């Protein structure tokens, strides 16, 4: 199989169109011409002819906002992900298809997603016999984070059904958005209990599924794909601080995220991590506070999660400590920010 040599690792602030290529046909399904909306978001409609085209994350997020308003469909992102397939994820999706097991496929997905997608961060963990596939939107603007998260959850389920069989379903799904007036589209797609107003976006399923063999996997093709993705990661160059931000985005909520923990994740010494961050002009503490602020804003905007619960999720022992920190970051209290 020949792999296109013109693919490049996308820079921070950009994303391969990928799954969002489905926006245009979904708009047509609503009886709408997608071109005016795409242009209004600052994009060229010809980009939607190829999912490997690279677009600014901010413009794509704006397009989702316009689509929700124009279609009056609050779960537009869910529709996008529902219509996408494992191959919508290009090289990463093909790697998943040719991985030996489902667990290896998801490890490859988590490790390589940043090659194509700088907006969504994924992590995989196992706890008490359950696999937890977590997603977060890595974008300070937070516009349409709920739509982008919905799309990520929906296509992830499609990918797992490709690997495990069409009857596969998660045990439960956690969604960081206000409970919709009609949750049925979510239940219909996921075929599982869906819990809204959550701190994280997460698919929960049996860890035994990770041991499943992937039917039709080709080890030679897998090696070619792994080599190409390795090259693309290397081409990313000096993205050390951005890599840390992406790791923090899924691990700050309810997890251990000390500088020592992060150094272990990156397989570097604690002093090396500090030095490289200092060379980039920022310390670890200030970076974690920026990500905490980003997560807090997203939860305040998209959910009705109580302040005390947000504070605990972000590692504060008391809601008052979170309120003081948020006031330092934004100049107002979390309650005032949410009301605004």
Image (cartoon, rainbow, N blue to C red):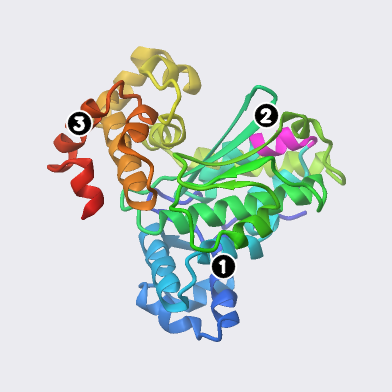
State the image quarter where residue 122 is shown. top right
Q: Which residue is mark 1?
A: 21
Q: Nearer the viewer, mark 1 or mark 3?
A: 3
In this orientation, which residue lies closer to the viewer: 213 or 148?
Answer: 148
- Label 2 vs 3, first from the N-terminus: 2
Is residue 53 part of the magenta span, yes or no? no
In this orientation, which residue lies closer to the viewer: 134 or 103?
Answer: 134
Point out which mark residue 130 bears.
2
> Magenta segment, which residues?
100-107
| Magenta: main secondary structure | helix
- For the N terminus, the image quarter is bottom right
**SS class of the residue under badge 2?**
strand
Q: Is residue 81 above or below residue 118?
A: below
Query: In this orientation, does residue 204 appear?
Result: yes
Point out which mark residue 325 bears.
3
Q: Is residue 321 above or below residue 231?
A: above
Q: Nearer the viewer, mark 2 or mark 1?
A: 2
The structure residue drawn at horizontal position 35% and vertical position 35%, both measured from the top left corner, is 310
Farthest residue, direction left: 331
Give percent across and percent down for residue 146: 44, 55
- Label 1 vs 3, first from the N-terminus: 1
**SS class of the residue under badge 1?**
helix
């Amino acid at each position: 199989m020949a792999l296109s040599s013109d693919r490049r690792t996308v820079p921070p602030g950009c994303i391969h169109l990928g799954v969002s290529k489905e926006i245009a046909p979904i708009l047509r399904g609503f009886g709408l011409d997608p071109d005016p909306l795409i242009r209004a978001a600052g994009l060229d409609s010809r980009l939607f002819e190829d999912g490997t085209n690279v677009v600014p994350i901010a413009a794509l997020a704006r397009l989702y906002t316009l689509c929700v308003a124009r279609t009056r469909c609050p779960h537009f992102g869910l529709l996008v992900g529902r219509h996408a397939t494992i191959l919508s994820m290009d090289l990463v999706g093909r790697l998943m298809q040719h991985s030996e097991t489902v667990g290896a496929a998801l490890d490859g997905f988590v490790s390589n997603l940043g090659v194509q997608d700088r907006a969504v961060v994924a992590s995989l963990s196992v706890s008490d016999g359950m696999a937890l596939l977590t997603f977060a939107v890595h974008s300070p603007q937070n516009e349409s984070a709920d739509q982008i998260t919905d799309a990520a959850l929906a296509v992830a389920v499609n990918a797992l059904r490709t690997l495990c069989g069409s009857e596969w379903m998660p045990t439960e799904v956690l969604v960081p958005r206000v409970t919709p007036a009609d949750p049925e589209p979510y239940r219909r797609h996921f075929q599982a209990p869906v819990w809204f107003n959550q701190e994280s976006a997460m698919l929960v399923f049996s860890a035994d599924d990770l041991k499943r063999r992937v039917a039709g996997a080709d080890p030679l093709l897998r090696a070619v794909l792994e080599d190409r993705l390795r090259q693309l990661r290397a081409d990313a160059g000096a993205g050390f601080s951005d890599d840390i931000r992406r790791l923090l985005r899924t691990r700050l909520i309810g997890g251990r995220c000390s500088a020592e923990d992060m150094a272990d994740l990156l397989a570097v010494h604690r002093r090396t991590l500090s030095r490289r961050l200092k060379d980039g002009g920022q310390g670890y503490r200030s970076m974690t506070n920026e990500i905490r602020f980003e997560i807090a804003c997203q939860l305040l905007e998209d959910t009705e999660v109580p302040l005390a619960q947000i504070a605990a999720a972000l590692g504060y022992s008391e809601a008052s400590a979170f309120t003081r920190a948020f006031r330092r970051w934004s100049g107002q209290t979390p309650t005032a920010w949410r009301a605004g």
